[in-house]
């Protein structure tokens, strides 16, 4: 089905064509697009023919189950809860950021959200395919391989929505298991939508217009646009936790580097730019400065690790009249990439210690003879209440990268130091636990 | 005649240049079913170092993952040199942890807190296996490196080899003081081995 329509062999040709014609993403052809021999000219026919020859056996294998329509780039599945009416209109939009409000940090002045898919549903559980397109590719490029979708569901006089970042490329996954799965398989299961809320009158009129246009001629719904409200706010945001036992000579160096993505919840309000806010999905941002940060914690330390992030409120409107979107969001837009000791303390080791057999997630033993162990790719733990900005309490996680290190160093060669124990916490077997405990800390 | 000589010379050159690579490719064992420990397709490379006296064992851990339900049989292990860092540590000991424990950075063998069984002939089943190994060096003041272990194993009648990455340094010193004799060596080695693991 999909493979039979693709010619991976031809991608070099595509790349060369892009190099001649403009930057990646500027062309009209999507990645991995279906191509025909008619479009191939001169000597390229030979390469195309070789592609066909190479793929012929695969095509034969897949032909029995082939579908006529091309495979969507992304399939979003979700549940909205009971529909207020007998049917609902689902519109999927892809975010295209523009402008920059601050010189050092990429804080978009606004976004344009063109529709990339729409569908009428008759049950609360639905699945909608987003086809490959120049818009989707552009969204992925602007998002460093991550497309920011906004999914709107209109039913009767009520609506719900959810923002959903989807990783489009394996390189953008950076070790995140879930993100890699998204990049490798197009099926993305969205969290449950928030409860339907009443639509403002102007929004109801806009939806009626869109519905009518779609039924009459399959018109594409008009895009929504957002513009920043007020100034962005920088706030310390929880990104991890540090546990260093009470052993003389033991230190732990926390390092947080420049490829760490951060995914935090989005606040949404139909009332105004001060809330009240309700959760409206998630937004992923990358490190804005390409910098790294970290600090060294000494013995008997149990603290959270914080990083500075920028938050911005946006006013949602639309190009239609009346506009399809009419509300506000409050979201993270930029991670500075620094890291410092947080103000509060995480819970201590729930097992009371790290001796063999105590912690089901495993243990590690470290020598006092300048023993050093740098755990790579500590999978970041997700937290609720990582930051509170503009009256909304954000939740989410950072990391899932190769750029977060827990570097323990034990230096007590002439004291009464004996080997010490570290062990895993939250989830994941050592050495890949989300949290590392040190003794009873 | 000249043409014939030219053709012969080119043919000989081609054979000489392609031959060794071809032979190497044929003799290189494929990874087979065992996998390097990874998250999201990216290898996990821990970095570790410890000070030892000349000839002592510096103990660390490397990991392999068996995705199969059936076991594989381990045959041997050898040290993988770190590209751009020498000398390479001499492998003294290797065993499979019988617990869920690992040697972050230890000295001496056997390790009382970490019971092991011999690697040679060990059958490892589904999941992660912690391979605990000890390397050493003899010259005072030198650092001895390893990028991990090359593990040869047998599965379904075939012999394969997989690399279990672990960026490790044995810092050899005859006088162990409070001052670290190999500062910052762990991070640099870990970065090098990470690049090796990512190909």
Image (cartoon, helix red, strand yellow):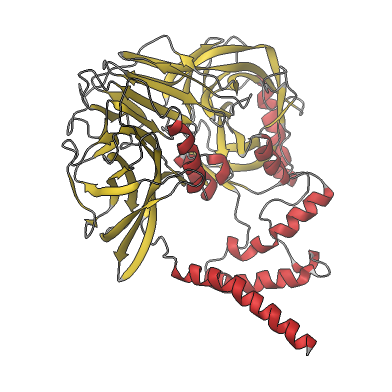
Q: Tell whether A51 sits left or right of A366.
A: right
| Residue A193 spot, x, y in % from top left | 49, 30
| Residue A377 spot, x, y in % from top left | 44, 35
Relative to A41, residue A223 above or below = above
Relative to A304, residue A166 above or below = below
**Picture quadrant where residue A40 is located:** bottom right
Measuring 30% from the left and 65% from the top, which residue is drawn there?
B154
Q: Residue furthest bottom?
A: B1
**Picture quadrant where residue A235 is located:** top right
The N terminus of chain B appears in which quarter of the rendering? bottom right
Measuring 56% from the left and 65% from the top, which residue is drawn there?
A66
Q: Can I make out residue A193 in this image?
A: yes
**Picture quadrant where residue B98 is located:** top left
Q: Tell whether A416 sits left or right of B13.
A: left
Relative to A233, residue A419 above or below = below
Q: Tell whether A197 sits left or right of B35.
A: right
Measuring 32% from the left and 15% from the top, which residue is drawn there?
A299
Depth check: B154 or A342 in front?
A: B154
Measuring 66% from the left and 55% from the top, which residue is drawn there?
A32
Depth check: B119 or A154 in front?
A: B119
Total marks in image:
0
Depth check: B136 or A347 in front?
A: B136
| Residue B71 spot, x, y in % from top left | 25, 59
Depth check: A133 or A354 in front?
A: A354
């Amino acid at each position: 089905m999909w493979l039979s329509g693709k010619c991976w062999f031809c991608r070099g040709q595509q790349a060369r064509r892009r190099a001649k014609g403009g930057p990646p993403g500027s062309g009209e052809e999507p990645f991995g697009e279906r191509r025909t021999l008619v479009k191939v000219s001169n000597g390229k026919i030979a390469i195309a023919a070789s592609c066909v020859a190479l793929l012929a056996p695969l095509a034969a294998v897949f032909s029995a189950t082939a579908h006529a329509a091309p495979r969507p780039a992304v399939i979003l599945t979700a549940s909205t809860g009971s529909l207020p009416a007998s049917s609902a209109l689902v519109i999927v939009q892809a975010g295209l950021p523009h402008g920059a409000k601050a010189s050092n940090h990429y804080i978009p002045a606004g976004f344009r959200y063109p529709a990339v898919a729409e569908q009428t549903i008759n049950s609360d559980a639905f699945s909608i395919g987003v086809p490959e397109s120049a818009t989707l590719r552009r969204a992925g490029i602007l998002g460093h391989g991550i497309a920011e979708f906004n999914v709107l569901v209109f039913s009767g006089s009520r609506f719900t929505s959810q923002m959903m970042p989807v990783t489009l490329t394996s390189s953008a996954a950076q070790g995140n298991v879930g993100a890699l799965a998204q990049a490798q398989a197009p099926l993305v299961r969205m969290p449950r939508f928030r409860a339907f809320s009443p639509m403002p009158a102007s929004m109801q009129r806009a939806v009626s217009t869109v519905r009518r246009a779609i039924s009459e001629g399959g018109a594409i719904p008009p895009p929504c646009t957002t513009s920043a409200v007020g100034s962005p706010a920088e706030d310390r945001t929880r990104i991890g936790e540090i546990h260093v036992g009470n052993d003389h000579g033991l230190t732990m160096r926390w390092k947080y580097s420049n490829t760490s993505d951060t995914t935090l919840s989005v606040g949404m309000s139909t009332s105004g730019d001060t809330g009240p806010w309700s959760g409206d999905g998630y937004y992923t941002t990358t490190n804005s400065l390409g910098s790294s940060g970290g600090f060294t914690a000494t013995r008997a330390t149990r603290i959270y690790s914080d990083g500075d992030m920028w938050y911005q409120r946006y006013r949602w409107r639309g190009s239609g009249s009346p506009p399809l979107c009419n509300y506000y969001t409050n979201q993270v837009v930029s991670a500075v990439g620094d890291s410092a000791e947080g103000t509060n303390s995480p819970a201590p080791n729930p097992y009371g210690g790290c001796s063999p057999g105590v912690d089901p997630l495993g243990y590690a033993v470290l020598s006092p003879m300048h023993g050093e162990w740098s755990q790579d790719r500590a999978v970041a733990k997700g937290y609720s209440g990582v930051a509170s900005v503009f009256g909304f309490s954000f939740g989410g996680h950072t990391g899932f990268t190769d750029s977060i290190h827990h570097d323990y160093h034990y230096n007590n060669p002439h004291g009464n130091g004996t080997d010490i124990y570290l062990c895993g916490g939250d989830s994941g077997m050592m050495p890949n636990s989300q949290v590392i405990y040190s003794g009873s800390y | 005649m000249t043409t014939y000589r030219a053709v012969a010379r080119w043919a000989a050159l081609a054979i000489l240049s392609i031959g060794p690579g071809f032979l190497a490719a044929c003799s290189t064992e494929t990874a087979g079913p065992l996998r390097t420990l990874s998250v999201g397709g990216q290898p996990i490379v821990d970095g570790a170092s410890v000070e030892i006296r000349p000839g002592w064992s510096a103990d660390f851990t490397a990991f392999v993952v068996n995705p199969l339900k059936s076991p594989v049989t381990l045959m041997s292990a050898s040290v993988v040199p770190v590209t751009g860092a020498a000398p390479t540590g001499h492998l003294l000991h290797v065993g499979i942890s019988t617990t869920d424990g690992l040697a972050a950075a230890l000295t001496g063998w056997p390790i009382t807190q970490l019971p092991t069984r011999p690697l040679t002939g060990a059958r490892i089943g589904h999941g992660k296996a912690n391979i605990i190994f000890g390397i050493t060096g003899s010259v005072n003041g030198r650092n001895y490196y390893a990028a991990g272990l090359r593990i040869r194993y047998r599965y379904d009648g075939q012999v394969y080899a997989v690399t279990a990455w672990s960026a490790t340094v044995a810092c050899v010193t005859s006088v162990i003081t409070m001052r670290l004799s190999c500062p910052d060596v762990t991070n640099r080695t870990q970065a090098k081995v990470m690049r090796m693991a990512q190909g």
